[in-house]
Image (tube, grey):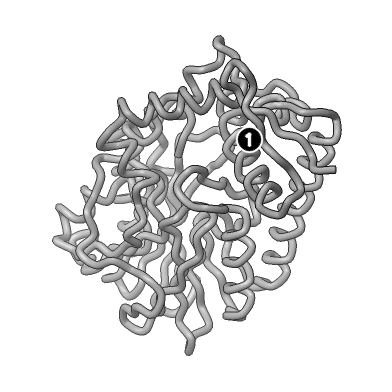
Amino acid sequence: MAGPPPPTWAVDPDEAGAREIADGIWRLRLPVGWEQITHVNAFLIDGTILVDCGTGGHPTCADALQTAFDRAGHRIEDVEHLVLTHVHTDHMGLAPLVLERSGAQLHAHPDDAHFVEAFTEPGRIEQRRERRARQEGVPERRLEPYRTAAEELEGALAAVTPDHHLTDGDELSGWQVVETPGHCPSHITLFHPERRIAFVGDLICPVFAPWLDYGYSPDPMAETFASLDRLDQLRPALSLPGHGRPITDTASVVADTRASFHERLGATRRALAQGPAGAYELTTRIWGEEPDLAATGHLAEMLAYLRYLRGRGEATRSTNDDGTYSYEETR
């Protein structure tokens, strides 16, 4: 994800946990280095299918994954399929280790450029990020956290190439693939129609507002709303998110997530009503001057909201004489 890395990637492996939450399904709770997020979930199905695998960044992250497997009474070497709900470092950072130790097949959505380009072409991506940050009015003194690709480069052991691409209609051992982009283009949901269980990645999360990747799809906010509708239509009895506890009231969490995004869109409209501004200034009108990690996340979020409002004729963008952008509400 665009933005600076955490102060340290090191974790305490003893904080890793494992719990069987449904017949044959283990939740592996893996600690992460982010201050705002305590953990990421991986899930092990029947000891052979691993859904996500946690972040890299430090040898203790791999130790934590091993601890979780030990506590579940299973072995990494027995994994036959590694499935990624999406290609972000906290969900796929340890994929090369899992694949090397197990010989598993890797399954993921093909639209992974939002991560892979930063890993394979960091110089070009950092230049592009810096250029856009300047266009959106980010001050010179704050450019570095907006331009860096360190999060991707440090948080994953390597970029990985799927053995199997997952798109709508694909199936693995009874688990159906449902494309649910918005959080990022590579995001999928795995759903078992008989068991009514869904692995939802970061589509919904009861512990924080989901990040919206910007720049690799036409309208991340509209895609998110459509993906929430798709999850609603599945009506899972149990949803297993990438962060937080299992969800038994999926419809309620979907409704809360949708309402939260509408609240933030409303805040964006009110910020625009104060007068024309670049995206950076609009974030400060809502959230003030923030630490780097929050500020970079909110800029990506703001760009997604502005794209959504522009697409619906509620806002316009113009280019100033100095090349910076200015947004204003449509009157």
Residue toward you, 234 or 275 = 275
Please tell me how many numbered marks the rendered image carries.
1
**Which corner quadrant holds the N terminus?**
top left
Does 19 sit left or right of 231 as displayed? left
SS for callout 1: helix
In x, y percent, where is residue 182?
54, 56
Tell me the crowding category of disc 1: few under 14, some 14 to 19, or many 20 or more residues within 10 angstroms, Cα based.
many
- Residue at x 51% of width, y 78% of height: 197
- Which residue occupies the extreme front position in the image? 321
- Residue at x 42% of width, y 25% of height: 148
Q: Quadrant of residue 318?
A: top right
Does 140 sit left or right of 76 as displayed? right
- Residue at x 67% of width, y 36% of height: 317
Residue toward you, 64 or 301 = 301
Query: Taking the image as drawn, is residue 208 in sight?
Result: no
Label 1: which residue?
A: 298
In x, y percent, where is residue 68?
36, 54
In x, y percent, where is residue 96?
22, 48
Q: Quadrant of residue 69?
A: bottom left
**Which corner quadrant holds the C terminus?**
top right
Residue toward you, 71 or 321 = 321
- Residue at x 77% of width, y 28% of height: 276
Query: Taking the image as drawn, is residue 238 in sight?
Result: yes
Which amino acid is tagged 1? His
In x, y percent, where is residue 112?
35, 52
Residue toward you, 101 or 122 = 122
- Which residue occupies the extreme bottom position in the image? 194
